Image: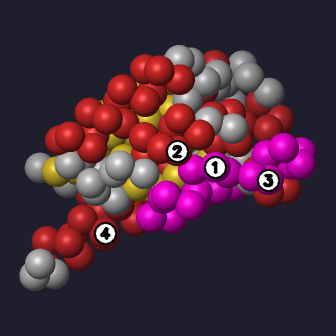
Amino acid sequence: MKRVLVLNGPNLRRLGTREPDVYGSSTFDDLVALCRETGRRLNLHVEVRQTDDEAEMIRWVHEAADERLPIVINPAAFTHYSYGLRDALAQRTAPLIEVHISNPAAREEFRHTSVVAGVATGTIAGFGMLSYVLALQAMADLLAQEETTPS
Ligand code: DQA
């Protein structure tokens, strides 16, 4: 079964209490359960992690690059300013999907820039928790294509 990392940046462990008008009422534990359940349905082994620490996030991205692991990432606020994270993600050796719960393009100006989007396979934003389900579905398709495409 193919492993996929679902990485979450700062403040996302506070889902449920954090600005519920923007991010909804589901908790981080709900998100973990949803991703695992989606993984089971898609035959993917999904591992969900969260950190508020940029260095830890970058270490996880290096681990993924070394182990050729696909990543679904919600970089949260790192999205908008972390060149360190972008440079780590640029080393990817497997598909990378950027996700957001809200639609940053429809919010404050500083959220309109994603410094990681340019190194991602694609981005899914604005569908609440469903963004993660859509990202995992897209990832399953990408991985299935890779398996059938001769290199
Ligand atoms: C977010 C959007 C970011 O702008 C914000 O900093 C977050 C969450 C989202 O999922 O909508 O923390 O990535």
Residue identified by numbered label 4: 142
In the rendered image, residue 110 lying in the magenta stretch gets the answer yes
Q: Gap between marks 1 and 4, in whole Å?
A: 23 Å
Q: Which residue is mark 1?
A: 115
Number of on-image labels = 4
Relative to 149, 18 lies left or right:
right
The type of residue carrying mark 4 is: Leu
Give the Cα separation between the discs numbered 2 and 4.
21 Å
CA gap between label 3 and label 2 equals: 16 Å
Q: Residues within 10 Å of mark 1 (few under 14, many from 20)?
A: some
The residue under label 2 is: 86
Question: Circles 1 and 2: CB distance less than 8 Å?
Answer: yes
- The residue that appears at 10% across and 82% down in the rendered structure is 150
3 vs 2, front mark? 2
Q: Sequence order check: which comes first, mark 3 or mark 4?
A: 3
Q: Is residue 73 magenta?
A: no
**Residue range highlighted in magenta:** 107-126
Amino acid carrying mark 3 in the image? His
